[in-house]
């Protein structure tokens, strides 16, 4: 007997937007408060399946030259960010891609939403109200497996799932987080963990 697809077994739920960012960084922690987004990666989960993705590099303006550490960590090249659009142009494209259908904004930990807020404030953009609620998938996984909060790579190991793509590439990490989320989704819906979102303080206030 064929196994039913997950989408047929789950109750209706809002789309999940799984977001992962990469940002400028330095090995010695210098300029820590001047980090800028250099990649936005995101996938959309609709009724138990990944149906769409958003992937864009972003050109930094405060420190336009990537450190050797950043290039080695992310595999993102100087050419890729030099040819990219700046954040004020990429961010509206990301928000347009998210769309107007009900959704839950998710990431692994709080870093990504805080970095988004930082860049929105830095460029004097308006923070979208629809991002005011955020679901921490890292916390969901800790509850799901009854373990201490851990990194995405460790979570994949615990679930015996091979990492796909390149770690610390936004779009690849977004896909890997989505794979973990899909494994947890029946539990998240049953326990209503999907509703346990954090309020995000708007940088516009």
Image (spheres, rainbow, N blue to C red):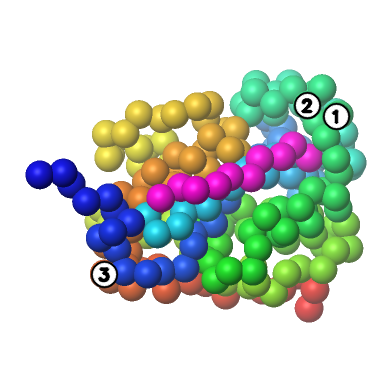
> Residue 171 location, x and y as percent?
58, 38
Residue shown at 26%/69% (left/top)?
Answer: 190
Residue shown at 52%/30% (left/top)?
Answer: 167
The relative height of residue 146 versus residue 155 in the rendered view (above or below) is below
The relative height of residue 141 versus residue 163 in the rendered view (above or below) is below
Residue, disc 3: 190
Cα gap from disc 3 to disc 1, whole angstroms: 45 Å
Q: How crowded is mark 2: few (under 14 residues within 10 Å), some or many (20 or more)?
A: some
Q: Which of marks 3 and 1 is nearer the N terminus?
A: 1
Please give the range of residues in magenta. 49-58
Q: Quadrant of residue 144?
A: bottom left
Cα gap from disc 2 to disc 1, whole angstroms: 5 Å
Query: Could you tell me if residue 110 is visible in this image?
Result: yes
Q: What secondary structure is marked by label 3?
A: helix
Left or right of residue 98, residue 205 in this image: right
Residue shown at 82%/22% (left/top)?
Answer: 79
Q: How crowded is mark 1: few (under 14 residues within 10 Å), some or many (20 or more)?
A: few
Q: Judge by depth and name the residue closer to the eye, 2 or 143.
A: 2
Residue, disc 2: 80
Please say whether residue 57 is one of the residues in the magenta stretch.
yes
Quadrant placement of the N terminus: top left
Q: Which mark is residue 83?
A: 1
Q: Furthest-bottom residue in view?
A: 205
Q: Earlier in the sequence, mark 2 or mark 3?
A: 2
The relative height of residue 143 versus residue 128 in the rendered view (above or below) is above
């Amino acid at each position: 007997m064929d196994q039913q697809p997950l989408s047929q077994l789950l109750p209706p739920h809002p789309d999940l937007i799984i977001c992962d960012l990469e940002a400028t960084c330095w090995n010695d922690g210098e300029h820590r408060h001047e980090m800028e987004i250099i990649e936005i990666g995101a996938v959309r989960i609709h009724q138990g399946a990944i149906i769409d993705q958003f992937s864009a590099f972003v050109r930094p303006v405060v420190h336009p030259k990537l450190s050797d550490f950043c290039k080695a960590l992310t595999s993102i090249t100087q050419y890729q960010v030099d040819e990219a659009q700046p954040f004020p142009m990429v961010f509206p494209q990301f928000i347009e891609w998210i769309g107007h259908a009900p959704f839950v904004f998710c990431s692994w930990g709080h870093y990504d939403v805080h970095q988004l807020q930082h860049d929105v404030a830095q460029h004097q953009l308006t923070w979208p109200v629809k991002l005011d609620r955020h679901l921490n998938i890292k916390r969901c996984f800790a509850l799901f497996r009854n373990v201490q909060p851990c990194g995405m790579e460790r979570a994949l190991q615990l679930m015996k799932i091979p990492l796909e793509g390149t770690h610390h590439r936004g779009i690849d990490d977004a896909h890997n987080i989505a794979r973990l989320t899909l494994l947890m989704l029946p539990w998240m819906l049953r326990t209503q963990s999907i509703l346990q979102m954090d309020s995000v303080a708007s940088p516009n206030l």
